[in-house]
Image: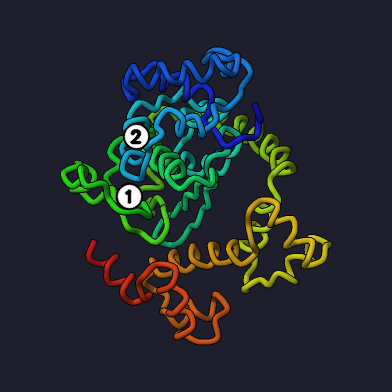
Amino acid sequence: MDRDEVGVPPLAFAQLLASEALDPAAVARFDGIMAREGLDARALVERDVQAPLRWFREVYPELDSDEATRLGLACADQAQLTSFGPLSLPLVSAGSVSEIVELLTFLPLITTALSPQMHPSERGLTVVLNGLSGDPDLDRLAVTYCGSALVRLLELLVGDMSTVTLHLSWRMPSSMGDHEDVRAGRLTFDAPISFLRVPAATLTEVCRFSDPIAYRHAISDLEDDLEHRRGARTFSRAVRSLIDEGAVLRSGQSVAAELSMSVSTLKRRLAGEGMTFRDIREASLKERATLLLLERSVSVSEIATDLGYGDVANFSHAFKRWTGQSPSEFRRDEEDR
Protein backbone atom coordinates (compact mmCIF):
# COMPACT_ATOMS: atom_id res chain seq x y z
CA MET A 1 0.00 0.00 0.00
CA ASP A 2 1.39 3.40 -1.01
CA ARG A 3 2.14 5.56 2.06
CA ASP A 4 1.58 8.72 0.00
CA GLU A 5 -1.83 7.62 -1.27
CA VAL A 6 -4.71 10.02 -0.63
CA GLY A 7 -6.12 8.92 2.68
CA VAL A 8 -7.50 9.43 6.17
CA PRO A 9 -5.32 9.91 9.28
CA PRO A 10 -4.91 6.43 10.83
CA LEU A 11 -6.04 7.29 14.36
CA ALA A 12 -9.03 9.25 13.06
CA PHE A 13 -9.95 6.24 10.92
CA ALA A 14 -9.59 3.79 13.83
CA GLN A 15 -11.77 5.98 16.05
CA LEU A 16 -14.29 6.33 13.24
CA LEU A 17 -14.63 2.54 13.00
CA ALA A 18 -15.35 2.41 16.73
CA SER A 19 -17.91 5.23 16.58
CA GLU A 20 -21.59 5.32 15.70
CA ALA A 21 -21.00 7.25 12.47
CA LEU A 22 -20.74 4.00 10.46
CA ASP A 23 -23.28 1.20 10.53
CA PRO A 24 -22.07 -2.31 11.51
CA ALA A 25 -22.26 -3.57 7.92
CA ALA A 26 -19.96 -0.78 6.72
CA VAL A 27 -17.49 -1.46 9.54
CA ALA A 28 -17.48 -5.15 8.58
CA ARG A 29 -16.68 -4.23 4.98
CA PHE A 30 -13.83 -1.98 6.08
CA ASP A 31 -12.51 -4.83 8.24
CA GLY A 32 -12.66 -7.13 5.23
CA ILE A 33 -10.69 -4.68 3.08
CA MET A 34 -8.01 -4.31 5.76
CA ALA A 35 -7.78 -8.10 6.17
CA ARG A 36 -7.23 -8.38 2.42
CA GLU A 37 -4.31 -5.95 2.77
CA GLY A 38 -2.91 -7.85 5.76
CA LEU A 39 -3.84 -4.99 8.09
CA ASP A 40 -6.17 -3.98 10.86
CA ALA A 41 -6.92 -0.63 12.52
CA ARG A 42 -4.19 -1.11 15.14
CA ALA A 43 -1.57 -1.84 12.45
CA LEU A 44 -2.50 1.36 10.58
CA VAL A 45 -2.00 3.41 13.73
CA GLU A 46 1.23 1.68 14.76
CA ARG A 47 2.73 2.10 11.28
CA ASP A 48 1.30 5.62 10.91
CA VAL A 49 -0.20 4.70 7.52
CA GLN A 50 -3.23 6.59 6.19
CA ALA A 51 -6.36 4.60 5.41
CA PRO A 52 -6.82 5.08 1.63
CA LEU A 53 -9.83 7.22 0.82
CA ARG A 54 -10.63 4.82 -2.04
CA TRP A 55 -11.72 2.29 0.59
CA PHE A 56 -14.82 4.43 1.10
CA ARG A 57 -15.68 3.94 -2.57
CA GLU A 58 -15.40 0.17 -2.08
CA VAL A 59 -17.55 0.20 1.05
CA TYR A 60 -20.07 2.61 -0.49
CA PRO A 61 -20.06 1.71 -4.23
CA GLU A 62 -23.15 3.87 -4.85
CA LEU A 63 -21.64 6.88 -3.07
CA ASP A 64 -22.90 10.12 -4.61
CA SER A 65 -22.73 13.78 -3.67
CA ASP A 66 -25.66 13.59 -1.23
CA GLU A 67 -24.39 10.53 0.61
CA ALA A 68 -20.84 11.89 0.68
CA THR A 69 -22.10 15.08 2.35
CA ARG A 70 -24.18 13.25 4.94
CA LEU A 71 -21.35 10.81 5.67
CA GLY A 72 -18.82 13.63 6.00
CA LEU A 73 -21.03 15.43 8.53
CA ALA A 74 -21.69 12.21 10.48
CA CYS A 75 -17.97 11.40 10.65
CA ALA A 76 -17.09 14.97 11.67
CA ASP A 77 -19.55 14.73 14.54
CA GLN A 78 -17.35 11.95 15.97
CA ALA A 79 -14.05 13.83 15.61
CA GLN A 80 -11.87 13.68 18.72
CA LEU A 81 -8.98 15.93 19.71
CA THR A 82 -6.69 12.89 19.88
CA SER A 83 -7.45 11.92 16.27
CA PHE A 84 -4.96 14.11 14.48
CA GLY A 85 -1.50 12.82 15.34
CA PRO A 86 1.11 15.61 15.42
CA LEU A 87 -1.63 18.27 15.30
CA SER A 88 -3.32 17.07 18.51
CA LEU A 89 -0.94 18.79 20.96
CA PRO A 90 -0.97 22.22 19.26
CA LEU A 91 -4.76 21.97 18.91
CA VAL A 92 -5.17 21.59 22.65
CA SER A 93 -2.49 24.14 23.60
CA ALA A 94 -3.44 26.88 21.08
CA GLY A 95 -4.19 30.27 22.58
CA SER A 96 -6.76 31.60 20.11
CA VAL A 97 -9.08 30.67 17.26
CA SER A 98 -6.51 32.14 14.88
CA GLU A 99 -3.83 29.74 16.12
CA ILE A 100 -6.19 26.77 15.76
CA VAL A 101 -7.25 27.62 12.21
CA GLU A 102 -3.67 28.30 11.13
CA LEU A 103 -2.86 24.68 12.01
CA LEU A 104 -4.57 23.79 8.72
CA THR A 105 -1.28 24.86 7.15
CA PHE A 106 0.12 21.62 8.52
CA LEU A 107 -2.77 19.43 7.34
CA PRO A 108 -0.54 17.71 4.70
CA LEU A 109 1.36 16.09 7.59
CA ILE A 110 -1.67 14.00 8.56
CA THR A 111 -3.66 13.61 5.36
CA THR A 112 -3.04 13.88 1.62
CA ALA A 113 -6.77 14.11 0.90
CA LEU A 114 -7.02 17.91 1.08
CA SER A 115 -5.15 21.04 0.14
CA PRO A 116 -6.06 24.05 2.33
CA GLN A 117 -5.34 27.59 1.10
CA MET A 118 -5.32 30.41 3.68
CA HIS A 119 -6.53 33.87 2.59
CA PRO A 120 -6.47 36.51 5.36
CA SER A 121 -8.18 39.88 4.92
CA GLU A 122 -9.47 42.74 7.05
CA ARG A 123 -12.79 40.92 7.40
CA GLY A 124 -11.22 37.73 8.72
CA LEU A 125 -9.79 34.51 7.35
CA THR A 126 -11.04 32.44 4.42
CA VAL A 127 -9.76 28.87 4.13
CA VAL A 128 -10.33 27.30 0.72
CA LEU A 129 -10.62 23.50 0.85
CA ASN A 130 -9.75 21.48 -2.26
CA GLY A 131 -10.03 17.70 -2.43
CA LEU A 132 -7.18 15.78 -4.06
CA SER A 133 -8.54 12.27 -4.64
CA GLY A 134 -9.60 12.78 -8.26
CA ASP A 135 -13.04 11.37 -7.37
CA PRO A 136 -15.52 14.28 -6.97
CA ASP A 137 -17.69 12.48 -4.42
CA LEU A 138 -14.75 11.32 -2.29
CA ASP A 139 -13.45 14.89 -2.44
CA ARG A 140 -16.83 16.12 -1.17
CA LEU A 141 -16.67 13.61 1.67
CA ALA A 142 -13.19 14.83 2.66
CA VAL A 143 -14.03 18.54 2.36
CA THR A 144 -17.27 18.19 4.35
CA TYR A 145 -15.52 16.20 7.05
CA CYS A 146 -12.59 18.60 7.36
CA GLY A 147 -14.67 21.78 7.44
CA SER A 148 -17.28 20.43 9.82
CA ALA A 149 -14.74 18.72 12.10
CA LEU A 150 -12.77 21.95 12.45
CA VAL A 151 -15.89 23.86 13.51
CA ARG A 152 -16.68 21.13 16.05
CA LEU A 153 -13.16 21.24 17.48
CA LEU A 154 -13.36 25.03 17.74
CA GLU A 155 -16.55 24.67 19.75
CA LEU A 156 -14.84 22.21 22.09
CA LEU A 157 -11.77 24.39 22.58
CA VAL A 158 -13.33 27.85 22.56
CA GLY A 159 -17.12 27.81 22.78
CA ASP A 160 -19.86 29.18 20.53
CA MET A 161 -18.73 29.26 16.89
CA SER A 162 -22.00 30.35 15.28
CA THR A 163 -20.16 33.07 13.33
CA VAL A 164 -17.99 30.53 11.48
CA THR A 165 -19.56 29.42 8.20
CA LEU A 166 -18.83 26.48 5.91
CA HIS A 167 -19.60 27.00 2.22
CA LEU A 168 -19.70 23.94 -0.05
CA SER A 169 -19.51 24.05 -3.83
CA TRP A 170 -22.23 21.51 -4.66
CA ARG A 171 -25.98 21.34 -4.33
CA MET A 172 -27.62 20.71 -0.98
CA PRO A 173 -28.85 17.14 -0.36
CA SER A 174 -32.63 17.07 -0.54
CA SER A 175 -32.89 15.70 3.00
CA MET A 176 -30.93 18.55 4.59
CA GLY A 177 -33.36 21.45 4.23
CA ASP A 178 -34.20 21.26 7.94
CA HIS A 179 -30.63 20.70 9.11
CA GLU A 180 -29.89 23.01 12.06
CA ASP A 181 -26.72 24.47 10.52
CA VAL A 182 -28.44 25.07 7.16
CA ARG A 183 -31.35 26.90 8.82
CA ALA A 184 -28.91 29.01 10.85
CA GLY A 185 -26.82 29.90 7.80
CA ARG A 186 -23.70 28.21 9.20
CA LEU A 187 -23.70 25.69 6.33
CA THR A 188 -24.45 26.77 2.76
CA PHE A 189 -24.27 25.07 -0.63
CA ASP A 190 -23.85 26.00 -4.30
CA ALA A 191 -20.82 28.20 -3.61
CA PRO A 192 -18.33 28.62 -6.52
CA ILE A 193 -15.62 27.02 -4.34
CA SER A 194 -15.64 25.26 -0.97
CA PHE A 195 -14.36 27.39 1.88
CA LEU A 196 -14.56 28.15 5.58
CA ARG A 197 -15.06 31.78 6.71
CA VAL A 198 -13.90 32.96 10.14
CA PRO A 199 -14.70 36.63 10.94
CA ALA A 200 -11.92 38.83 12.28
CA ALA A 201 -13.57 39.22 15.69
CA THR A 202 -13.85 35.45 16.08
CA LEU A 203 -10.16 34.91 15.27
CA THR A 204 -9.14 36.68 18.48
CA GLU A 205 -11.34 34.63 20.81
CA VAL A 206 -9.31 32.88 23.51
CA CYS A 207 -9.04 29.10 23.91
CA ARG A 208 -9.78 27.29 27.16
CA PHE A 209 -6.54 25.32 27.52
CA SER A 210 -3.90 27.75 26.27
CA ASP A 211 -0.27 26.67 26.77
CA PRO A 212 1.98 29.04 24.80
CA ILE A 213 5.23 27.15 25.46
CA ALA A 214 3.81 23.78 24.40
CA TYR A 215 2.24 25.41 21.34
CA ARG A 216 5.49 27.07 20.21
CA HIS A 217 7.47 23.85 20.58
CA ALA A 218 4.84 21.88 18.66
CA ILE A 219 4.75 24.46 15.84
CA SER A 220 8.55 24.36 15.51
CA ASP A 221 8.44 20.57 15.06
CA LEU A 222 5.57 20.84 12.57
CA GLU A 223 7.43 23.41 10.48
CA ASP A 224 10.45 21.11 10.22
CA ASP A 225 8.28 18.14 9.24
CA LEU A 226 6.32 20.16 6.67
CA GLU A 227 9.49 21.45 5.02
CA HIS A 228 10.65 17.86 4.62
CA ARG A 229 7.28 16.78 3.24
CA ARG A 230 7.18 19.61 0.71
CA GLY A 231 10.25 18.18 -0.94
CA ALA A 232 8.16 15.16 -1.93
CA ARG A 233 5.00 16.92 -3.15
CA THR A 234 3.60 16.16 -6.58
CA PHE A 235 4.69 18.20 -9.58
CA SER A 236 1.19 19.57 -10.24
CA ARG A 237 0.96 20.88 -6.67
CA ALA A 238 4.33 22.58 -7.07
CA VAL A 239 3.05 24.26 -10.26
CA ARG A 240 -0.15 25.34 -8.49
CA SER A 241 1.92 26.90 -5.70
CA LEU A 242 3.94 28.94 -8.19
CA ILE A 243 0.76 30.17 -9.87
CA ASP A 244 -0.87 31.07 -6.53
CA GLU A 245 2.19 32.95 -5.34
CA GLY A 246 2.44 35.08 -8.48
CA ALA A 247 1.28 38.69 -8.26
CA VAL A 248 0.27 38.59 -11.94
CA LEU A 249 -1.30 36.07 -14.28
CA ARG A 250 1.34 33.41 -14.91
CA SER A 251 2.02 31.86 -18.31
CA GLY A 252 3.19 28.32 -18.92
CA GLN A 253 6.42 29.73 -20.26
CA SER A 254 7.16 31.77 -17.12
CA VAL A 255 6.40 28.83 -14.80
CA ALA A 256 8.51 26.47 -16.91
CA ALA A 257 11.41 28.95 -16.80
CA GLU A 258 11.15 29.20 -13.00
CA LEU A 259 11.31 25.40 -12.82
CA SER A 260 14.30 25.38 -15.22
CA MET A 261 12.59 23.32 -17.91
CA SER A 262 11.02 23.72 -21.33
CA VAL A 263 7.30 24.28 -21.84
CA SER A 264 7.02 20.86 -23.50
CA THR A 265 8.58 19.19 -20.44
CA LEU A 266 6.18 21.10 -18.18
CA LYS A 267 3.22 19.88 -20.23
CA ARG A 268 4.52 16.29 -20.31
CA ARG A 269 5.06 16.10 -16.56
CA LEU A 270 1.63 17.56 -15.82
CA ALA A 271 0.02 15.15 -18.29
CA GLY A 272 1.67 12.31 -16.39
CA GLU A 273 -0.40 13.36 -13.37
CA GLY A 274 -3.57 13.79 -15.44
CA MET A 275 -3.38 17.60 -15.36
CA THR A 276 -2.93 20.49 -17.77
CA PHE A 277 -1.42 23.90 -17.10
CA ARG A 278 -4.65 25.59 -18.22
CA ASP A 279 -6.76 23.59 -15.76
CA ILE A 280 -4.42 24.42 -12.88
CA ARG A 281 -4.29 28.11 -13.75
CA GLU A 282 -8.05 28.39 -14.15
CA ALA A 283 -8.63 26.68 -10.79
CA SER A 284 -6.33 29.27 -9.21
CA LEU A 285 -8.05 32.16 -11.00
CA LYS A 286 -11.52 30.94 -10.01
CA GLU A 287 -10.46 30.66 -6.38
CA ARG A 288 -8.81 34.07 -6.27
CA ALA A 289 -11.72 35.72 -8.10
CA THR A 290 -14.26 34.26 -5.70
CA LEU A 291 -12.33 35.40 -2.65
CA LEU A 292 -11.88 38.91 -4.03
CA LEU A 293 -15.60 39.16 -4.85
CA LEU A 294 -16.39 38.29 -1.23
CA GLU A 295 -14.48 41.43 -0.24
CA ARG A 296 -17.06 44.16 -0.82
CA SER A 297 -14.46 46.93 -0.85
CA VAL A 298 -12.92 45.72 -4.14
CA SER A 299 -14.73 46.59 -7.38
CA VAL A 300 -15.23 44.11 -10.19
CA SER A 301 -13.04 46.19 -12.50
CA GLU A 302 -10.23 46.18 -9.89
CA ILE A 303 -10.52 42.41 -9.56
CA ALA A 304 -10.31 41.99 -13.34
CA THR A 305 -7.15 44.07 -13.40
CA ASP A 306 -5.60 42.27 -10.41
CA LEU A 307 -6.14 38.91 -12.10
CA GLY A 308 -4.59 40.05 -15.36
CA TYR A 309 -7.68 40.45 -17.54
CA GLY A 310 -7.65 43.16 -20.19
CA ASP A 311 -11.16 44.34 -19.37
CA VAL A 312 -14.17 43.61 -17.16
CA ALA A 313 -16.06 41.88 -19.98
CA ASN A 314 -13.39 39.20 -20.40
CA PHE A 315 -13.26 38.60 -16.66
CA SER A 316 -17.06 38.44 -16.39
CA HIS A 317 -17.22 35.95 -19.26
CA ALA A 318 -14.60 33.74 -17.61
CA PHE A 319 -16.27 33.88 -14.18
CA LYS A 320 -19.65 32.98 -15.66
CA ARG A 321 -18.06 30.04 -17.50
CA TRP A 322 -16.60 28.80 -14.20
CA THR A 323 -19.64 29.33 -11.96
CA GLY A 324 -22.73 29.92 -14.11
CA GLN A 325 -23.04 33.43 -12.64
CA SER A 326 -21.68 36.84 -13.53
CA PRO A 327 -19.56 38.54 -10.82
CA SER A 328 -22.40 40.93 -9.99
CA GLU A 329 -24.92 38.06 -9.73
CA PHE A 330 -22.56 36.22 -7.42
CA ARG A 331 -22.24 39.26 -5.15
CA ARG A 332 -26.00 39.76 -5.02
CA ASP A 333 -26.56 36.10 -4.08
CA GLU A 334 -23.94 36.34 -1.31
CA GLU A 335 -25.64 39.45 0.08
CA ASP A 336 -28.97 37.56 0.17
CA ARG A 337 -27.58 34.53 2.05
Which amino acid type corresponds to the residue marked 1 in the rendered image?
Answer: Thr
Q: Upstream in the sequence, badge 2 or badge 1?
A: 2
Left/right of residue 288 with respect to residue 324 in the rendered view: right
- Measuring from the top left, give residue 206's x and y in whole percent: 39, 38
User: Residue under circle 1?
Assistant: 165
Quick check: 294 above or below 103?
A: below
- Measuring from the top left, give residue 267's x and y in whole percent: 72, 62
The N terminus appears in which quarter of the rendering? top right
Question: Who's the residue at 46% across and 84% down the image?
Answer: 312
- Measuring from the top left, give residue 246's x and y in whole percent: 65, 67
Dot 2: what SS? helix
Quick check: 32 above or below 65?
A: above
Q: How is the image coloured?
A: rainbow
User: Residue under circle 2?
Assistant: 71
Dot 1: what SS? strand
Left/right of residue 45 with respect to residue 255 in the rendered view: left
Nearer to us in this view, 292 or 58: 58
Give the image quarter of residue 205: top left
Quick check: 125 above or below 333?
A: above
From mark 2 to mark 1, how far is it between C-alphas? 19 Å
Given the current orientation, which residue lies at the most extreme front position? 61
Which amino acid type corresponds to the residue marked 2 in the rendered image?
Answer: Leu
Nearer to us in this view, 12 or 220: 12
